[in-house]
């Protein structure tokens, strides 16, 4: 047995039927031209043929899983690949709608702690001939960014490569060509490890002393700059309630060229445009439900704080709170409000040391850590209304066993007080949106996909 770090065990301890603590992802593949009708079955056989398993994907919580399993790992002697790799087919007519319904059911189900906590589902039956793969892994094993990185490492940029690599095979990580960016924590919710941040800051007296002027800078910004958003300034919404265990998953892909054209014309960042899209979509969605508050919604957003001429600060990432401009009907005004909000937060954090940035980011998201406390969500204002984060994906066309990767959609974690999560993955020249929501608290979440398209179209009309 091996000791389980606190940052791993906390996800097991916090997990319940209402709060599954795994991250997932849906990938869509276009089979190669020479693929026969049995391509999906052969893909399953190829995966199940990889009997050797890496240490990470071959461990599970120790027995008894509810006690020792929260603090110690143990390894399995043999992996039951017929259990971990499953073959499914969609009911007719095999629309994306049926696929999302099936992924929603898989994503809400707890992983078995008596086995290594991961699953892969290969799905055929899509009406357009594509093959889908949905995978999920417990956050105590792998965080959201690392999960996507493992999946990417199993792919190839060569369509003739038919090796059929899998994420659990030993030595896959050695294929990495360059140092990856800092891993996001909490299923893509956070851009850093808050416990480690506290440990680092607490061990450095000078940095602790430096937190006082840093805090005064933030307080000063709150008082002086109306664009700066602090925690607990968010209005109450349908997203900020205790949640149940059922989930809904929807996804959509948007051309990066469309978003980049708006960015160039408006002189903002791609991240600003994405947040304005989300703000416009959430405004329309909540208006339909008669649930739009007068005050703008806010989002916790990981952002890079690296200066343009600084190539060494790979970990210069902070968690900021940004306005979404849902109180503004005009898309131009909304994008301006988002841009000013993000710029104000970056300006404040740009004056802090790296450890002060970590500590300030931890303070911004502290409300997430308190959400499991009974009654906390029901009796306090939300620190922010939702998390909108991104995970880096492939930068060029990729293939698995000759099948071209056509979409890669993250599926993250919903929490009490955070009934919906939006995670975006880059995939060559596309941004892939994956939305996970509590089925009970957030009705008809599939409408957000149409509202996102409408919000992007409105921005195009205003700026291009």
Image: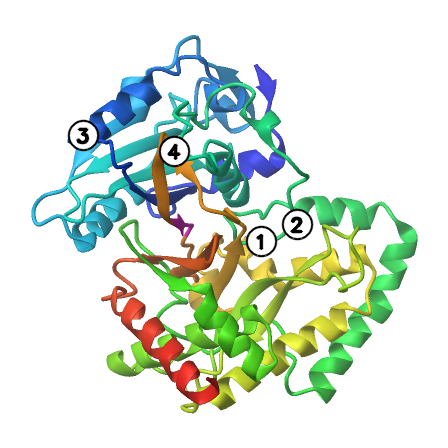
Q: Mark 3 sits on what residue?
A: 36
Using the image, determine if residue 396 lies above or below residue 158. Answer: below
Q: Closer to the N terminus: mark 4 or mark 2? A: 2
Left/right placement of residue 85 relative to residue 302 reads left
How packed is label 1: few (under 14 Cα within 10 Å), some, or many (20 or more)? many
Q: Mark 4 sits on what residue?
A: 400
Tag in front: 1 or 4: 4
Q: Closer to the N terminus: mark 2 or mark 3? A: 3
SS state under label 4: strand
Q: Closer to the N terminus: mark 1 or mark 4? A: 1
How packed is label 3: few (under 14 Cα within 10 Å), some, or many (20 or more)? few
SS state under label 2: helix
Across and down, in percent, residue 405 comes to 37, 43
| Residues in magenta, as a range | 408-413
Query: Which residue occupies the extreme top position in the image?
Result: 77
Q: Mark 2 sits on what residue?
A: 194
Across and down, in percent, residue 132 comes to 27, 41
- In which image quadrant can residue 225 be found? bottom right
Tag in front: 2 or 3: 3
Distance from disc 3 to disc 4, alpha carbons, whole Å, reads 15 Å
How packed is label 2: few (under 14 Cα within 10 Å), some, or many (20 or more)? many
Tag in front: 3 or 4: 3
Query: Which residue occupies the extreme left position in the image?
Result: 92
- Labels 3 and 1 touching (C-beta < 8 A): no
SS state under label 3: loop
Q: Residue 190 carries which label?
A: 1
Residue at 33% from the left image edge and 15% from the top image edge: 80
- The reply to whether residue 298 is in sight is no
Q: Closer to the N terminus: mark 3 or mark 4? A: 3
Residue at 58% from the left image edge and 28% from the top image edge: 175
């Amino acid at each position: 047995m091996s000791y389980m770090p606190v940052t791993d065990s906390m996800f097991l301890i916090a997990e319940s039927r209402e709060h599954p603590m795994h991250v997932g992802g849906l990938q869509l593949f276009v089979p190669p031209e020479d693929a026969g009708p049995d391509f999906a079955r052969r893909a399953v056989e190829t995966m199940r043929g990889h009997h050797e398993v890496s240490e990470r994907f071959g461990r599970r919580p120790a027995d008894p899983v509810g006690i020792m399993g929260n603090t110690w790992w143990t390894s399995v002697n043999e992996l039951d690949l017929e259990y971990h790799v499953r073959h499914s087919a969609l009911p007719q007519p095999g629309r994306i709608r049926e696929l999302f319904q099936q992924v929603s059911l898989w994503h809400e189900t707890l992983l078995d702690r008596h086995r290594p906590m991961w699953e892969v589902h290969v799905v055929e039956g899509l009406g357009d001939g594509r093959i889908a793969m949905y995978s999920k892994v417990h956050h105590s094993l792998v965080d959201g960014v690392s999960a996507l990185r493992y999946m990417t490492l199993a792919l190839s940029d060569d369509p003739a490569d038919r090796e059929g690599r899998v994420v659990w095979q030993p030595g896959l990580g050695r294929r990495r060509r360059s140092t990856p960016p800092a891993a996001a924590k909490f299923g893509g919710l956070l851009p850093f490890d808050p416990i480690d941040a506290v440990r680092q800051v607490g061990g450095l007296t000078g940095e602790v002393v430096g937190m006082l002027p840093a805090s005064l800078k933030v307080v000063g910004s709150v008082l002086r700059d109306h664009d700066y958003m602090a925690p607990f300034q968010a209005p109450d919404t349908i997203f900020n309630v205790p949640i149940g265990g059922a989930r809904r998953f929807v996804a959509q892909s948007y051309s990066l060229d469309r978003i980049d054209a708006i960015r160039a014309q408006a002189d903002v960042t791609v991240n600003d445009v994405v947040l304005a899209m989300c703000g416009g979509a959430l405004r329309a969605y909540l208006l339909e439900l008669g649930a739009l508050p007068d005050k703008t919604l806010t989002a916790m957003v990981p952002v890079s704080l690296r200066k343009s001429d600084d190539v060494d600060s790979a970990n210069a990432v902070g968690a900021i709170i940004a306005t979404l401009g849902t109180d503004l009907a005009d898309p131009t005004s909304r994008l301006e409000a988002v841009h000013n909000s993000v710029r104000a937060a970056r300006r404040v954090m740009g004056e802090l040391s790296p450890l002060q940035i970590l500590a300030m980011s931890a303070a911004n998201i502290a409300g997430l850590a308190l959400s499991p406390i009974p009654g906390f969500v029901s009796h306090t204002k939300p620190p922010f209304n939702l998390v909108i984060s991104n995970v880096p994906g492939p930068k060029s066309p990729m293939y698995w066993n000759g099948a071209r990767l056509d979409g890669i959609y993250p599926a993250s974690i919903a929490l009490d007080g955070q009934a919906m999560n939006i995670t975006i993955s880059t995939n060559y020249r596309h941004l892939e949106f994956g939305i996970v929501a509590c089925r009970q608290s957030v009705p008809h979440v599939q409408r957000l996909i149409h509202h996102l398209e409408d919000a992007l179209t409105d921005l195009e009309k205003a700026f291009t």
